[in-house]
Image: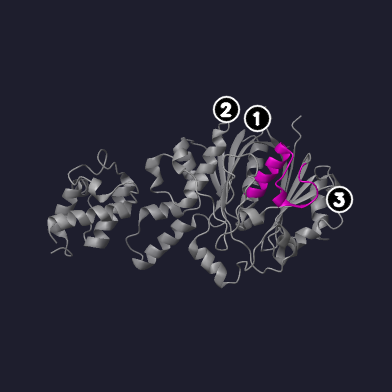
Amino acid sequence: MAVYLKASSMVSAQDTLNRSDMPENLVNAENSALKTRPCNYKDYLPAASLRRMSRIVKFSLVSAFDCLNQLEDFTPDAIITSTGLGCLEDTITFLTQMHQNEEKLMNPSSFIGSTHNSIGGQIALLKKLRIPNLTHTQMEGSFESALIDAMMMLEDGEANNILVGGFDEITPETILLWKNMGCLSENEVNRETLVNSTNKGIIPGEGAGFFALSKNKDQSSKVKLCGIRIRHSYNGGLNVAVSEFLSEYDMKPGDIDLLILGVDGTPDTHTLLNLTNNDFENATVAAFKHLSGSFNTDTTFAFWLAGCAIVNGKIHPECCLKGANIRKFKHVLLVNSSKAGNFTFIYLNDDLE
Amino acid sequence: MNMDALVEELKVKLIEQLNLEDIKPEEINPSEPLFGDGLGLDSIDALELIVLLERDYGIKISDPKEGRKVFATLLTMAEYIRANSPAIS
């Protein structure tokens, strides 16, 4: 069984909020990172509640509410969120206070904000949604885990509609840590260097993506989400694993129109490029991490991008590594990877008949 | 520290501790209620104020009824601190 994507919203370093395609003008990394664009939080959130929210809580809630606002008759039966590292800014504040105050006199606000499920909780509180509320945290597989959970709930009939999201943030402290560990890219990462660079580091990014999924197909359905897989190991190579995954949907690599790869410019992700050596001969090949930055839930950006590509029949030229950027994208496959050597596959199509 | 100086200090600490982004110290009326009307603080703010009192003035409030009186206004807070804080002479 498949489920249907009805609305999506992405807050990222690019001007993606309140849009259903990539903006013409793109921004590059500043100070070796891609931070989310500032937005007017008061347009989406009660002004009185803003003072207690950290940046990630604010931009994630904006994404969630922007997604919900796009649909008039979508009442979620569950909220499933995901994050690799949670609300880092509040966590750092809380831990710093714990250290400075010798584990006494802790401030409640930063503790409340530091928990991974604070964003799911805030969505429920502000929208008065007394429904199942879950947060998955599986590092780079967090968003995929949330999607799998949502699909299972929809397939099992536990819910008709689910709001699914993923979010992560960067802070000055995390950038410093990455820099000291030699994990920051020393060179510019763009469309060309993604493929050819010998960078050892990445461009850290952040963002929040929220998606309205439904088991029911109707006029507001935009994309069909057919399947997701997280592979911790595979025999015979990545090509075999991808072919096995696609065969579950009676598909083969040659049927794919758009292949979105999580290449980040480091040799670690060059394995993904090898996918295109023999297979996927009919696919446009695209990348996104040079525009979103790398973060644990950056698949949200690719998922949003895939939905836009199917609906609009085009992707931004700056995403395109190979093939035509304007064409009908009927079958789309996302392949992302993690530092731990895991791979994730997501297959979507435009079959709304 | 005299009363006026303490009130001014509390205004600054209140804004900082409770992250009252849009409020300036001169806009806080020391005689106005802190909770409900006035500044419109809530129960999480009350916990923050209890932490502030203990951390910065060495005063521990454990009786909720006492807290209600102490945190009625900024002025009652200042009066309580002057009467009970070992840090304020």
What is the chain letter for disc 2?
Answer: A
Residue that sits furthest to the front in the current view: A25
Residue ID at (31%, 48%): B45
What colour scheme has been applied to the protein in the rendered image? one colour
Q: Disc 3 vs disc 1: Cβ atoms closer than 8 Å?
A: no
Q: Is residue A124 left or right of residue B22?
A: right
Residue beneath disc 3 = A281
Q: Nearer the viewer, residue B69 or A312?
A: A312
Say which element carries label 3: loop
The amino acid at mark 1 is Ser
Query: Where is residue B8 shown, x and y percent of the image?
Result: 20, 54
Choose the circle earlier in sequence order: 3 or 2: 2
Q: Quadrant of the N terminus of chain B?
A: bottom left
How many angstroms separate mark 3 from mark 2 (CA)?
Answer: 41 Å
- Residue A73 is tagged as 2
Choose the circle earlier in sequence order: 1 or 2: 2
Q: Is residue A322 highlighted in magenta?
A: yes
Residue A46 drawn above or below residue A323: above
Q: Mark 3, mark 2: which one is toward the viewer? A: 3
Q: Badge 3 local density, few (<14 within 10 Å), some, or many (20+)?
A: some
Residue ID at (25%, 50%): B25
Say which element carries label 2: loop
How many angstroms separate mark 1 from mark 2 (CA)?
Answer: 10 Å
Magenta span = A300-326
